[in-house]
Image (cartoon, rainbow, N blue to C red):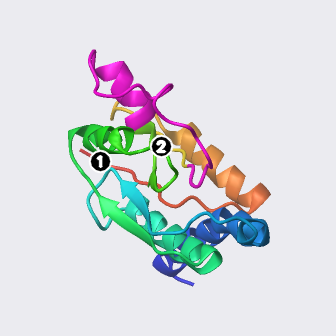
Amino acid sequence: MNYTRCARRRFLLAAAVAVSPIKLLSSAYAQQTFPTRAVQLVVPFPPGGVTDALARLLGNELQAALGQPFIVINKPGASGAIAAEFVKGSPADGYTLMMGHIGTHAVNPALYKKLPYNPVTDFAPISLSWSSFFVQTDRLFDCRFLLESIGWQVAQCGVQPLAVVEADD
């Protein structure tokens, strides 16, 4: 099995795991009247990225489970602040959701003194749909230990890293 095919399978498996609680709870939602109209799923990045792909996958599954369209709206720019401000300004009725991100809710408050939103008080988290881990070092760092650790993890746990990149400059 080649690497691209393996990475695609891992992505689809992770997406299926993220969507499975929706399928399990769909009967509980069927007894409620929400949603009665289309729901906007706002992505703070341009189309084509991982967050966009996950939003579209979730939107399709939610539409199938709940019977109403989930429309993905991409609002890129300002490190996600444009999308966050848009969602903050929308009525708090559950019909506008945002694929929150570490950038919009943790990095931006650390980088910018003034944001048009407060990530703690202006939003209510409803689900964790995706989590990733990534390590970056400068080129002077001896990364043999890190690469050996990844090799050990693969051998012991069968967990495959999505990408290991080494650069020689």
Q: Is residue 83 left or right of residue 7?
A: left
Q: Residue 160, image x and y in percent?
A: 62, 62
Q: Which residue is mark 1?
A: 168
Looking at the image, can residue 96 be seen?
Answer: yes
Q: Residue 167, image x and y in percent?
A: 32, 49
Looking at the image, can residue 12 be seen?
Answer: no
Quarter-of-image position of residue 136: top left
> Magenta stretch mostly in which secondary structure?
loop
What amino acid does circle 1 point to? Asp
Work out which quarter of the rendered image holds the N terminus and state it: bottom right
Depth check, front residue: 96 or 7 = 96
Residue at 65% across / 66% down in the picture?
33
What amino acid does circle 2 point to? Ala
Vertical arrangement, residue 169 with respect to residue 25, above or below: above
Quarter-of-image position of residue 133: top right
Q: Residue 88, image x and y in percent?
A: 37, 38
Q: Is residue 145 magenta?
A: no
Residue at 64% across / 44% down in the picture?
149
Residue at 39% across / 69% down in the picture?
71
Q: Residue 101, image x and y in percent?
A: 44, 43
Work out which quarter of the rendered image holds the C terminus and state it: top left
Magenta segment boundaries in residue numbering:
104-131
Q: Is residue 156 left or right of residue 106?
A: right
